[in-house]
Amino acid sequence: MTRSARQAAVIGGNRIPFARANGAYAQATNLDMLTATLDGLAARFGLAGERIGEVAGGAVLKHSRDRDLTRESVLGSRLSPATPAYDVQQACGTGLETAVLVANKIALGQIESGIAAGVDTASDAPVALNDDLRRVLMRLNGARSLGERLRAIAGIRPGQVVPEIPRNAEPRTGLSMGEHAALTALEWHVGREAQDELAAASHRNLAAAYERGFFDDLVTPFLGLTRDQNLRADSTAEKLARLKPVFGGPDGTMTAGNSTPLTDGASAVLLGSDEWAAEHRLPVLAHVVDAETAAVDFVHGGDGLLTAPVHAVPRLLERNGLTLQDFDFYEIHEAFASTVLATLAAWEDPAFAKERLGLDAPLGAIDRSRLNVAGSSLATGHPFAATGGRIVATLAKLLHEKGRDTGNRGRGLISLCAAGGQGVVAILEAA
Amino acid sequence: MSLAPLYAKAAVGAVGPRASTLPDTVLRRSVDVDRTHLAAYAQVCGFRFSDALPPTYPHVLAFALQIELMAGRSFPLPLPGLVHVANTITVHRRVDAAERLQLAVHAERFVGHPKGAQVDLVAAVDVDGERVWDGRSTYLARGAHAPEPGEQSPPPPEIADGPPSAVWRVDGDTGRRYAAVSGDVNPIHLYPLSAKAFGFPRAIAHGMWTAARSLAALEGRLPDALTHTVAFGRPLLLPSTVELRTRRDGDGWGLDVRSRKGTHLTATAGDRPGA
């Protein structure tokens, strides 16, 4: 493929430690967390009062009062109020999609700098009015006469005081994400032991990364938390093996240990042109090479809810003339351990490659020692829209470190599955 | 942290002999910030909830000590009827909610005022011996006499008329909500009926709520270290619709809060406001 555009630089990132739902951030709103995260980024890179090209952010669980959440957050932050912002919502893909959008505008020369952000809270989640009650109130609002008003009020029933709590379920299937993932795990024969090993590795890798100070310039403490609350440094596959399954019935393989918990948190990534970074004396860690988003028909088409990255990656590799083995790091979002393992299995399967991906040969296996080397969502937790930003900043720094230590201009692959049968994947290259 | 018993004690003790000069008492207390309380305060006043204490937050921590000092007979002015007329806060550096705060409160500058006598309640917050926050609340007792005449510090400059930066609806329960987070349960702030007993047509907003709410409107525009000076004007009757006007003022900001009834407060805030 021909490239005429320049590549956006990943300059750095900031996030707050991720907290378990109803934990350290139980009283914090999305606006509180996102503003703290942007302020932390501004402090780290000297952006106070700076007009940034744009801030793209979003949240998956969002109150109706949080219209234009990201712009509101920018207005309350130390960034210049002349910084435009907009919200994006693409389930768990949100945080990576915002990075792709900002990177594309930088590549096109429409902006010189940008921030990609995401935030989510499961503790301060919106609770909506009962839908029947909401209809009554809307009728009441539109009533023009006393009679109409009385008729509207007469429609109120005691049962309508029960509010609608958001559920982690697909609207079209009624199944939770975990139940969907359990179906995929079964389809790809993903065993319990392999899932527990992957989960233990995630905790081990994250703990080691914290220990060596890897997150010192990626994380700003918030509300008393200095590390991800979900991290269990002493986690082992043996300990995880004792947990009872929570998805897939009594014979299921998915537990609270190898599934991500509900989490609160926020992340932000600073992107820019190389010129902008140089002008501001800021380092360039990596460049955004390319990205692809795929979607699958998980409702009627027989695809797994979280399997869209399986389709996105081969398209991305093809366009960039790369093979799956051409990467130094793989960041595959651990929505569930089984999701990662099913994704890898699909890429290794010759029949699937031929029949579903239209390829002569499967993508093949990856070197597992390059997978999620600084931990991933099973250990950090997964505040939906904040995960993409966490991964982009982590991978950019990993690539930068490797380049510095070995002189090797490394390459990394990001794969993020999302509810709604979508998946966002991207390639970063060390600067 | 309701101060109702102290108010009751002060009301009972309002009649009878009092000291004629200020006590030289310094009340001290160590405080660990309760983040749940901080979150509630931030929500009522419109601040973001984070690790940094809002500039006005230590005032509510020190307020109980202020009342304790003013409620006794050794204090020359009766607490009921004291009007908060001015307030100055200096934040010397960002104060983190995880820090243990050493509070000290004393009274000084008991002097005459054109309408009576005034006194300053001075609060200081130290962290490990380092001064991080200073507060000075000036109260007026109408018709009272002070041992010496006083000089009035000039009020913050007025803001020019013009379109407001913001228009807020201040709800009728604002006084009760602020009372719950500040401990200031003075009946004039709570209900129309309890306010009427003290000569107000309706409940009035706490001055420090209006001060905090208008300061919160400058979210993101203020440095960590700052001075916030407020002169209170007409009582803000609840509910009300008020207008906020802000103006860049040297390195800081000037602001006022008005309604059709008049100006409720005028303030400056910033690194070196007015400089």
Image: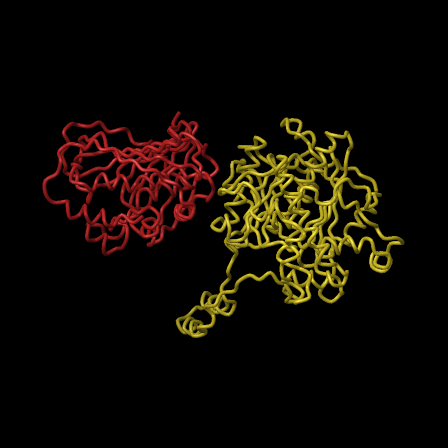
Chain colours: A yellow, B red
Using the image as rendered, state which of residue A190 and residue A328 is in the foreground. A190
Residue B67 % position (x, y):
25, 41
Q: Tell which residue pokes out farthest to the left in this image.
A: B17
Using the image as rendered, state which of residue B247 and residue A251 is in the foreground. A251
Using the image as rendered, state which of residue A49 and residue B1 is in the foreground. B1
**Image quarter of residue A246:** bottom right
Relative to A188, is B7 on the left or the right? left
- Count of marks, rendered view: 0
Residue A181 % position (x, y):
69, 60
Name which residue lies at 69% across and 37% down. A396
Relative to B140, is A355 on the left or the right? right
Q: Tell which residue pokes out farthest to the right in this image.
A: A360
Residue A379 % position (x, y):
63, 48
**Image quarter of residue B145:** top left
**Image quarter of residue B25:** top left
Q: Quadrant of the C terminus of chain A?
A: top right
Relative to A222, is A311 on the left or the right? right
Q: Quadrant of the N terminus of chain A?
A: top right
Relative to A42, is B135 on the left or the right? left
Name which residue lies at 73% across and 51% down. A293
Name which residue lies at 62% across and 57% down. A256
Residue B268 % position (x, y):
37, 33
Image height of A150 relative to A280, above or below: below
Q: Tell which residue pokes out farthest to the top in this image.
A: B275
